Amino acid sequence: MSHYPNLLRPLDLGHTVLKNRVLMGSMHTNLEERGDWNRVAEFYATRARGGVGLMVTGGIAPNPEGGVFPGAGGLYSDKDMAHHRMVTDRVHEAGGKIAMQILHAGRYAYGPDCVSASAVKSPISPFPPKELDEEGIEKQIADIAATAGRAKEAGYDGVEIMGSEGYFLNQFLVTHTNKRTDRWGGSYENRMRLPIEVVRRVRETVGKDFIVIFRLSMIDLIPNGSTFDEVVQLAQEVEKAGASIINTGIGWHEARVPTIATSVPRRAFAWVTQKLMGKVSIPVITSNRINTPEVAEQVLAEGCADMVSMARPFLADPDFVAKAEAGRGDLIAPCIACNQACLDHTFQGKVSSCLVNPKAAFETEIVVEKAQTVKTVAIVGAGPAGLSTAITAAERGHKVTVFDRAGEIGGQLNMAKQVPGKEEFWGLVDWFRAMVAELEIEVRLDTTATAEMLEGFDEVVIATGVTPRDPQIPGQDHAKVLSYIDVLRHKAPVGDRVAVIGAGGIGFDVSEFLVTGESPTENLPDWMREWGVTDPAENRSGLAPEGPQPEPAIREVTLLQRKAEKPGKRLGKTTGWIHRASLQMKKVQMKAGVNYERIDDEGLHISFGEARERPEVIVCDNVILCAGQLSERSLADALEAKGVACHVIGGADVAAELDAKRAIDQGVRLAAGL
Ligand code: NAP
Ligand code: SF4
């Protein structure tokens, strides 16, 4: 009996059968634009080998004006055809199936030639779109249909027509962006004419035995979006027009509601997809924040959908399905929904990868093979850098011993997991623990490693992490002063009024911890209220008319930094706004450009600017120091002094801008070469 009977059940589409109910959702890796198609092919083939039922590629532009950015990958020339052939051949050899996503960005296209229903500029792009005329609309339809035809010729098993997330087809559907008065605008029948016509023409072009997925926005989360009746009507028309599957899209990119970040509860939107079940006869796929086989199974068992789409989880672990089939869900590297190495990279024009799995999209570069010579490897530090080195080294057959002076593995991850909205870090630590056990890595906890203890090992890796920076503020030895470690690790009691020194990642995390009572991430109705999300059947677009209704903060927090820039400016590109909005909702005061004058019984005394003007006292019960970190190198220095060779990685190597992404990447790369 399978552990996940619903998830692993085949799905018969008539002309073809998908081996399970798992779709790898579309992700833009930026690999196509780099021109290394062997690497693109290997990225998808690796995931096909891992057993996923069907994959969807990153968005491929139907024409230059519809590309997400100038030069976005398309399928125009014979050369493009040969490249895509490499992908489909390699996936088929690996026993997989793959559909190509056709993505017309409309007004989200980051270029001056962008087009849309009306000339309404998007708040997330500087380029106002040109309003298409009748001929222009026909050209877009023809280009999309022709691209579908070429996808079939290139060997794809299907296409996904991107109709959600606020892209081109979505822009015609709603009055927010469609101000037309001709046959493409006005009534809903007119506004949905374009997506339906696109599906009809695509089906006409590709013929009967070809998968056509339509990705449909079930809840727009923008003003003047669709009602749920309109969603159902569109789904039914899309089915009639020839779609084989309906996939779920949640929220436009410009929505001010988080939809995939780690603070979004797991399976937060499966209930929206469920509302469509029974209204169409083709399979319906649900998505967003589903990252374990247990959650996916539950969603299907409850009848929320016929199939589950997971995208980022396949960056974290390409063998997700194979491990689920083997009943080893505990060995699946979890996607923690941080966006740090995937979406943040995409938006920075870098190749997307994964914080948890740096091999993602680097399959041809980071190759982990059995070692020629088995070595003994000592690793000091059981944080992300040390553990990822240990796991990769052990996978290669080395005999690994890990030392840590703490009583548990995980290092700084154990602090991150205490922060409301970062509960996924529990799963990451659990995964490290499962892998350590599986690979029989020896772990010596409560052990302060010394140079003597490390003698005799073939390789020594120092991953001792960081120590808090001493900000040297007069009065910082006052009893009311605590460090982030006291608060997050040792759960020191904290008063009602707090000043947080340092507005970096940790200052934001500590503030979140201090103002939040029950984590809304653990309670979907609370989270929906907090962000103003409601049933789209009751309120158009799924936005609550009363707006966000956050729980009041449980403490008064002032978050400070010396730099004059906006606090939180350097947080993650796709998640920083969520952290800032979340603290603003809790009325956290943010002060930039401050000097810390002193701390005393009254509180924290500050002034502003070089001239130390506008002296002010922040009356508070506690001051929490989150002033950055320095490398913990004492052991590395002791070894070097003795002439013992060692590898220094993670925070012990460079503390500035350290995060788990760099730590894990460095660890895996080092171990791949040991
Ligand atoms: P950080 O991001 O470098 O922030 C350090 C903060 O301390 C800054 O606000 C800095 O601002 C302040 N500071 C620096 N020197 C100071 C001094 N001498 N006196 C007073 N204040 C001082 O470091 P962090 O917050 O410790 O975080 C460490 C790493 O973990 C970061 O790289 C971060 O990316 C990562 N992290 C990420 C997340 C995430 O959500 N992605 C969460 C937590 C941590 P001023 O110099 O302007 O005062
Ligand atoms: Fe998931 Fe973070 Fe990896 Fe992206 S980088 S796939 S969000 S764990």
Image (spheres, helix red, strand yellow):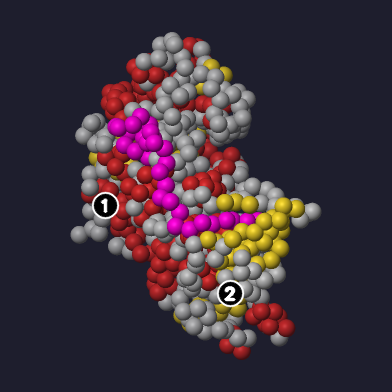
Q: Which residue position holds label 2? A: 479
Q: Is residue 366 visible?
A: no
Q: Residues within 10 Å of mark 2 (few under 14, many from 20)?
A: few
State whether residue 418 is above or below residue 611: below
Question: Disc 2 marks which amino acid?
Answer: Ala
The disc label shown at residue 298, or none: 1
Comparing labels 1 and 2, the label whose residue is closer to the camera: 2
Image x and y of residue 238, in percent: 32, 25
Q: Residue at x 53, y 38 (%)?
A: 83
Snapshot quadrant of residue 661: bottom right
Question: Disc 1 marks which amino acid?
Answer: Gln
State whether residue 551 is above or below residue 126: below
Q: Residue at x 64, y 80 (%)?
A: 635
**How many marks on residues?**
2
State whether residue 326 is above or below residue 98: below
Query: Could you say whether the residue bearing mark 2 is in a helix, strand or loop?
Result: loop
Q: Which residues are magenta?
A: 533-562
Image x and y of residue 117, in percent: 48, 19
